[in-house]
Image (spheres, rainbow, N blue to C red):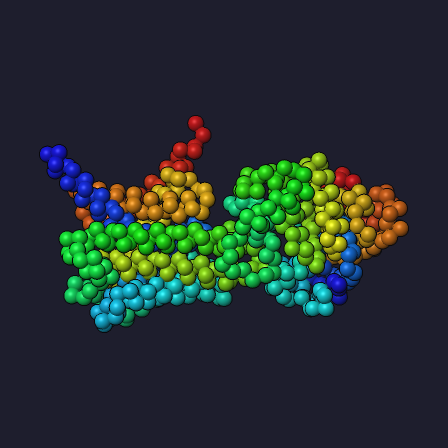
Amino acid sequence: MTQDVAAQLQALVVNMLEQGALAGFLGLGVLISFRFFRFPDLTAEGSYPLGGAVAASLLVAGVDPVLATLAAVAAGMLAGMATALIHTKLRINNIVAGIIVMTALYTVNLRVMGRANISLLSVSTLFDDAAGAFGVGDQGETLVTIVLTLLLLALAGAALAWFMHTDLGLAVRATGENQAMIRSLGVDTDRTKLIGLGLSNGAIALSGALVAQDHGFADIGMGIGILVTGAAAVMIGEALFGDGSIERWVVATMVGVLIYRFLVALALRVGLEPVDLKLITAALLLLALALPRLRSKPA
Amino acid sequence: MLALHDVGKTFIEGTADVVRALDRVSLTLEAGDFVTVIGSNGAGKSTLLNAIAGLVVPDAGRIVLDDEDITVAPVHRRAALIGRIAQNALDSTCASMSIAENLAMAARRGQARGLRRAVTAGRATEFRERLAVVGLGLEERADARIGTLSGGQRQAVALLMATIAWPRLLLLDEHLANLDPRTAAVVMALTGRLVAEGGLTTLMVTHNMAQAIRWGNRLVMMHAGRIIFEVRGAEKAALTVEALIRRFHVASGTDLDDDRVLLAS
C-alpha cells in the first residue's frame, strides 16, 4: 500500500518535472508580455503551435533536431515581431494585434504542417539524440529529457535576467511601465516592443517545439488556451514569491510552472479527464489572481 | 539656441469649444538663459513646453533648437537635447525600478542602448555621489524602488535624471506644484544648483509669482495663448509680486483671476 503511494507520488513528480521544464520557456515568454509589457499577448496561441509545427515539419524532412528547434524559435520571434509591428506601425491596440496574428498563424501552421498533425514517432528528436548520446536508451530518456530541459531552462532564465539588467533591457522594461518617460529619454519604443515581443514569442515557440518532440507529435490544436496556462504559471509564482527583483520574478515563474503542472497531474490522477484540462487551467488562473486580492482585503 | 517662430496650436478646432492654446508665440532663448514662465490657467504655458518637448505638434510656426528644425520631430529624436520634468513625479520615473536603474536609463539619454550592464559598480558609485548632492539621504537607498519614495524624493530623482546627461535645454513644467512648501524649497534649491552647475538653458513654468521673480534671468507672462510681456535683467531683479499683478492687468486688460496664482504668491 505505502509502496503504491510512493510509486504514485514518484510518477507525479517525474511528470511535473518533465512537463514543467518543457513549459518553463512558455512561462518565461508570457512573463515578458504579461508582466513586463502588461498585456495578454494572444500571439502565444499561434506561436506555440508554430514552434511545434516548424520543428516537426523540419524533423520529418530530415533536418537535424538542433537546427529544427532553432528554426522554430526564429519562426516564433518573427510572429511576435509581426504583432509588435501591427501594434506600433499601424497603431492598432496590442491585444487586437495579437488576435490578428494568432488567427493568421492558424492557417500558417496548417500550411507548414500540410495537415492537422504530424507524428514524430518514426524520426529522431532532440531528446532521442540526447538519450542516444548518453547511451541510456528508451528507459532513461525521461531522465535525460528532464535534465537537458531543466539545464536549457536555467540558461534561458539566467539569460533573460541578465538581459533585463542591461541598458537595452532596462529600456524594454520601462517601455511596459512608463512609455512616455522612456521615450523622453530617447528610446524608440517601437523598437523595444519589437525586441520584447520577439523574445517572448521565441521562448514560447521553443516550448512548443520541445513539447512536440517530447510528446511525439505536433498538433494544430496544441496552442489552445496556452496563454492562460502561461499566465496561470506566472501568477502562481507571483502569488507565492511576490513581485520583487528580476531574478525573483524569473525563478517565481519557473516554480509557478512546476506547481501548475503538478496540480494538473494531480487533478488527472484523482479522476478528472484530459477533456477537463482547460477548465482546470482556467480555475487555477482564477485562483492565482483572486487569492492575493482576497488576502489583502481589509478585515 | 532655441527659437520659436509664430508657433500656434488650436485644440478641438471647428467647434464652439475651440481652444487657442498657442497663438503665434515667438520666443528666443540664448545659451544659459533661465526663463520663468507664468500665467493663469489655460494661458498655454504647458502647451508651450509640450510643443518644445514634442508631446504636442504645433499646427503653425517653427521650433528651431541648435539650428535644427524640430517642429515635427518625434519625442525620442529630440530627447538627446532636451531634459524634461512633468508636474507629476510619477510621469518622470519608473516606480518598479530602483533609483540607480532610473538614473542609469537617464544617463544614456539619446545614446544607443546595448547589452552592457546598466548599473555597474563604477556607475553605482557615481550615482551615489550625485544623490548625495540632493541632501535627502537618497545615496543610502540607491537600490530602493522609486515607488517606495515620497513625492519630493521622487521629484528630486526626476530632476537628477533630467540633468544627469547635461541636456542642451531643461524644461520644468510646474515641477514643484504637488510638493509641500518645505520639500518644494529643497527641490527648487536643487534645481537652481544643477542649472547653475551645468550652465543649463532652462524654461520653467510655475504658478508661483514669487518663485518666477526670484529665479532665472528672464520672466515671461502668458495669457490666452500669447506672451503678453517679458521682463529681464535689472528690471526683473527689482520686480515685486504687486508690480507683476499690475503689469498683468495693464497688458491683458483683465484681472489675474486665478486663485491658485494669487494664493501661491
Q: Position of residue A208 (x, y in %)?
A: 29, 59
- Residue, x 42% and y 54% (percent of image)? A160
Residue nearest the viewer, comparing A48 with B164: B164
Looking at the image, residue A132 sits to the left or right of residue A204; the answer is left
For the N terminus of chain A, give its image quadrant: top left
Q: Position of residue B139 (x, y in %)?
A: 61, 40
Any part of residue A37 in sight: no
- Residue, x 33% and y 53% (percent of image)? A153
- Residue, x 20% and y 43% (percent of image)? A12
**Figure check: B255 above or below A41:** above
Any part of residue B127 in sight: yes
For the C terminus of chain A, give its image quadrant: top left
**Figure check: A2 above or below A185:** above
Residue nearest the viewer, comparing A275 with B83: B83
Extreme-top residue of the structure: A299
| Tally of marks | 0
Q: Position of residue A48 (x, y in %)?
A: 31, 59
Q: Position of residue B212 (x, y in %)?
A: 78, 47
Looking at the image, residue A169 sits to the left or right of residue A125; the answer is right
- Residue, x 68% and y 46% (percent of image)? B175
